[in-house]
Amino acid sequence: MIKKFVPYLHVNSIYEIDIDALKKAGIKGIITDLDNTLVGAKVPLATPELIRWLKQLEEIGFKVVIVSNNNHARVSKFADPLNIPFLPNARKPANLAFKKALQLMSLKASETVVIGDQLLTDVYGGNRFGLNTILVKPVSIGEDSFFTRINRRIERIILSKLKKKGLMPWED
């Protein structure tokens, strides 16, 4: 059970992800969280740097879907200007949103990676569904919602257990 919380990769930000290596590994699609993964939770629109990164993904041929536990208004305001499909109110770590995202991209789990900032929602949910997972450090912890702050406390306990078992291959 505890191994379901171990991401395939851990990076400081999305910009450290080697997208060429993902492509070579057969990854064709990216399911990404929004808040504190792509931008801070209170940042309404994509930054110029993020727009360039997303354009690079598109040029390489990746399909991208935003899967967020946040509400429709928040996610659509962010995703619509970028023409990126999205699934709000996802209820991660539940499987349904991951299943719908794969259907939107017409891809298999083995061809897809989940990128997110939370072990309890993004990594655990993606791993349970058989997806590759990449954990990023949160863009801005100070902007976390009440529930996310609770999740982060639980995550610290899980990270401690992973460390004790030698399953945390990075320093936190």
Image (cartoon, rainbow, N blue to C red):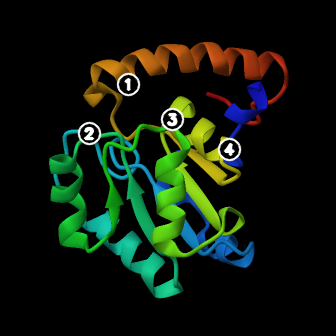
Residue annotated with mark 3: 121
Whether tag 4 and tag 3 are in contact, CB under 8 A, the answer is no
Residue 63 in the image: x percent, y percent?
A: 48, 75
* In the image: residue 9, left or right of residue 58: right
Q: Is residue 17 visible?
A: yes
Please name the amino acid that badge 1 sits on: Thr
Mark nearer the viewer, 2 or 4? 4
Mark nearer the viewer, 1 or 3? 3
Quarter holding the C terminus is: top right
In the displayed structure, would residue 32 be above or below residue 135? below
Whether tag 1 and tag 2 are in contact, CB under 8 A, the answer is yes
Q: Residue at x 46, y 50 (%)?
A: 97
Mark 4 and mark 3: Cα distance apart in space: 10 Å
Mark nearer the viewer, 4 or 1? 4
Please name the amino acid that badge 4 sits on: Asn
Mark 4 and mark 1: Cα distance apart in space: 19 Å
For residue 28, what is the image quadrant? bottom right
Q: Residues within 10 Å of mark 3 (few under 14, many from 20)?
A: many
Q: First in sequence: mark 4 or mark 1?
A: 4
Secondary-structure class at tag 2 = loop
